[in-house]
């Protein structure tokens, strides 16, 4: 199996294995880009990985689970700033890379809305600014809070820094709703970027790799005076929470932004069809070198806001918008070495160490090679002259080796069959796309990575236990598992004696640990580091089972393949057989059960708090069956989820409502047998409109 096999030709096992590997890589790169402003992969390489993941999910729908990166946005907010919960999520965008992709986007829109060929469909095309996404909240016309996108649900409060940017008005100049949230992109002009780097170099300070990193670094200053000294700008283009409607279409909204005092991009324009859209793309692409700001594509949005509301969202992106990306830049350099890194699940990931080369003003020195299949498929060897590609501002992928420049004494790279850290056997069976160390908890790399995950921002978020300290405490045998974190107060004296620590830093750490002895169930499950169980899946599990005791009891019962508990687990929308297998395998291991027992004794794990909703459907499980005539199945599902319902693919005794369209048969019969309420499409429409 390799990454060029058409997804439809992959077996279910190979598809699941390749999907798991891609998901793990994508999560790592999301964190590097959104949290650290230090991407490890090119836009083009990242986009290629994401396209492959989506293609596999299209061919094998059971893999499109809630925890897939296809359902997630960005990465969690960084430490050091107050966290802000977005009332309306700040979503990402799907990508298009060719006119055919754009044509398919338009076709999907028409199909979803049941538009005929002659029905008008206006699209607004806006340059995609390569900066930092922010959200600005105004109340009664006054700017009260600004935040980064973060993971889409939670960002960083950077109000004081945003107030220093001239393009962001303190008061809206025109009448506005009581509450309005304006969203846009903060950027540093190219001319200002060059001047800033000259000043940084003269002062012996850090030189920024590109304008986006400089803008992100400037906004994340704890001293707003530093931010004020840098000429940041912002283009506004969207909205979040509003207390009343402000426009009927995207064009009117952009005009309203201008009236309020914001800057909107002058190259935005409305287009009526594919030819006009692609013509505009070509025109702006040609103007790109002349602009004083970086753009990496064009965003297409359905103009009518009533259409946007009908189209709704998938988990990570709106259906009514897409980003048409510009092609990648390329360069050549020497592949000096291939090094192996070991992840928390034991995966062996090869990393290319490159002779530094400048591409588009950025120095490139390394790139991930994903796995041994990638190396074999491209026949990459130490000493090769390789083509790398970069789009935007990030470190690239290795595209191919130039065989005509290959050294005569080059040797085929042999992927290691033992772990480079613990020397345990590294196994790859028929279900795995990656090779994994079998050392488990005896492998220092895996233990340390699992501990890092346990204390990470989305898990226990313990300040003072960063990567460096976790590694050092493990090396000194003070941390061998998660429960040891909550016993560190027993080692207060030895901690104080550590070089560079001191009494105050130890007190701060122990206070931070005590503060996090109380944790929500969903964070606790995520912190365990179970394969394929990230934030979204952890939340699904917490929401379904409510508390730790019930979750553990259900997982134990689900080991019986004929049990109702297993059926209930598999019926959770977003959890398929692959995730269930990894989940049950974790809970079945003796050492993991012991860890759960220890943590249960040491912590106060809070039951899941159901979100508040005025809808009668909130928390209900809905099944759609048969053909709907007045809306597409996709639209019906989107509306149900927007009202807080859970959509399931099968009927069980946990189902609350079945919506039966034309031709409904087996599922409708089962609902009747179980005494579950069944309604037709007309009643469903009345229910969601009430």
Image (cartoon, rainbow, N blue to C red):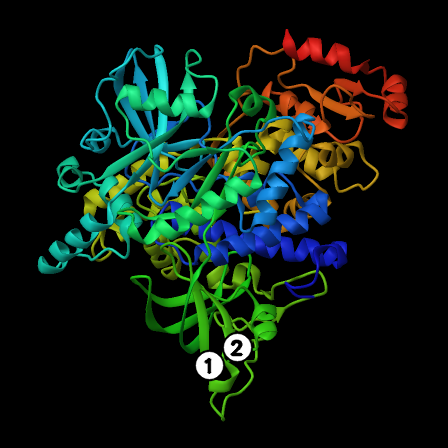
Quadrant of the rendered image containing residue 82: top left
Quadrant of the image occupied by residue 372 = bottom right
Q: Which residue is mark 2?
A: 380
Whether residue 155 can be seen here:
yes
Crowding near pointer 2: few (<14 within 10 Å), some, many (20+)?
many
Q: Residue furthest top?
A: 690
- Is there a contact, CB below 8 Å, between mark 2 and mark 1? yes
Q: Which mark is residue 384?
A: 1
Of residue 671 and residue 217, the one placed in the foreground of this image is: 217
Residue 677 in percent (x, y) is at: 80, 13
**Neighbourhood count class around disc 1 (C-alpha, 10 Å): few under 14, some 14–19, many 20 upward:** many
Q: CA distance from mark 2 to mark 1?
A: 7 Å
Q: Residue at x 63, y 19 (%)?
A: 619
Near-viewer residue (190 or 277): 277
Image quadrant in which the N terminus is located:
bottom right
Horizontally, residue 535 falls left or right of residue 667, namely left
Where, by quadrant of the figure, is residue 15 drawn? Answer: bottom right
In the rendered image of this protein, does residue 61 appear above or below residue 689? below
Residue 534 in view here: no
**In the rendered view of the protein, which quadrant contains the C terminus?**
top right
């Amino acid at each position: 199996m390799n990454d060029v096999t058409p997804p439809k030709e992959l077996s279910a096992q190979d598809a699941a294995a390749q999907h798991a590997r891609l998901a793990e890589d994508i999560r790592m790169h999301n964190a590097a880009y959104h949290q650290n402003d230090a991407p490890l992969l090119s836009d083009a390489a990242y986009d290629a990985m994401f396209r492959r993941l989506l293609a596999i999910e299209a061919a094998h729908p059971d893999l499109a689970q809630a925890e897939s990166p296809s359902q997630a946005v960005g990465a969690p907010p960084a430490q050091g700033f107050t966290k802000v919960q977005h009332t309306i999520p700040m979503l990402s965008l799907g990508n298009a890379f060719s006119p055919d992709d754009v044509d398919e986007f338009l076709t999907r829109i028409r199909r979803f809305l049941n538009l005929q060929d002659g029905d008008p469909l206006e699209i607004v095309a806006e340059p995609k600014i390569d900066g930092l996404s922010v959200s600005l909240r105004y109340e009664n016309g006054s700017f009260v809070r600004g935040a980064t996108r973060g993971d889409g649900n939670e960002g960083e409060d950077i109000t004081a820094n945003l107030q220093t940017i001239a393009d962001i008005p303190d008061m809206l100049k025109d009448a506005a709703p009581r509450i309005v949230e304006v969203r846009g992109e903060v950027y540093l002009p190219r001319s200002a970027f060059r001047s800033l780097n000259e000043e940084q170099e003269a002062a012996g300070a850090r030189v920024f790799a590109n304008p986006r990193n400089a803008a992100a670094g400037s906004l994340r200053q704890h001293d707003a005076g530093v931010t004020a000294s840098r000429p940041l700008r912002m283009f506004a283009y969207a909205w979040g929470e509003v207390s009343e409607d402000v426009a009927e279409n995207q064009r009117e909204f952009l005009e309203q932004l201008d009236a309020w005092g914001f800057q909107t991009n002058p190259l935005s324009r409305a287009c009526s069809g594919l030819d006009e859209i692609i013509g505009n793309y070509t025109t702006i692409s040609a103007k790109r070198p002349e602009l004083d700001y970086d753009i990496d594509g064009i965003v297409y949005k359905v103009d009518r806001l009533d259409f946007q509301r009908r189209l709704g969202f998938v988990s990570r992106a709106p259906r009514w918008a897409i980003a048409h990306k510009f092609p990648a830049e390329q360069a050549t350099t020497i592949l000096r070495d291939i090094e192996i890194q070991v992840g928390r699940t034991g995966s062996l990931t090869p990393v290319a160490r490159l002779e530094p080369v400048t591409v588009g003003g950025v120095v490139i020195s390394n790139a991930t090679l994903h796995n041994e299949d990638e190396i074999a498929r491209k026949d990459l060897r130490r000493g090769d002259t390789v083509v790398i590609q970069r789009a935007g501002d990030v470190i690239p992928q290795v595209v191919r080796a130039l065989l005509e420049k290959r050294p005569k004494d080059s040797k085929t790279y042999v992927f290691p069959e033992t772990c480079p850290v613990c020397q345990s056997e590294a196994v790859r069976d028929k279900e795995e796309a990656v090779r994994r160390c079998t050392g488990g908890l005896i492998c220092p790399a895996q233990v340390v990575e699992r501990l890092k995950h346990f204390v990470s921002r989305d898990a226990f978020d313990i300040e003072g236990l960063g990567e460096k300290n976790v590694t050092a405490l493990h090396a000194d045998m003070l941390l061998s598992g998660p429960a040891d974190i909550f016993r560190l107060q027993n080692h207060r004296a030895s901690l104080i004696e550590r070089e560079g620590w001191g009494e105050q830093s130890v007190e701060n750490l122990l206070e931070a640990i005590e503060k996090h002895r109380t944790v929500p169930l969903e964070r606790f499950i995520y912190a365990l580091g179970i394969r394929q169980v990230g934030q979204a899946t952890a939340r699904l599990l917490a929401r379904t089972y409510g508390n730790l005791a019930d979750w553990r009891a259900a997982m134990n019962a689900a080991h019986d393949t004929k049990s109702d508990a297993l059926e209930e687990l598999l019926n959770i929308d977003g959890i398929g057989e692959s995730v269930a297998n990894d989940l049950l395998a974790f809970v079945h291991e003796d050492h993991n059960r012991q860890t759960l027992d220890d943590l249960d004794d040491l912590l106060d794990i809070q039951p899941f708090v159901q979100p508040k909703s005025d809808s009668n459907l909130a928390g209900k499980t809905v099944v759609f069956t048969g053909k709907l005539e007045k809306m597409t199945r996709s639209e019906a599902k989107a509306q149900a989820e927007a009202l807080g319902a859970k959509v399931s693919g099968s009927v069980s005794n946990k189902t609350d409502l079945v919506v039966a369209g034309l031709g409904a048969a087996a599922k409708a019969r089962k609902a009747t047998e179980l005494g579950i309420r069944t309604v037709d499409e007309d009643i469903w429409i009345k229910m969601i409109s009430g």
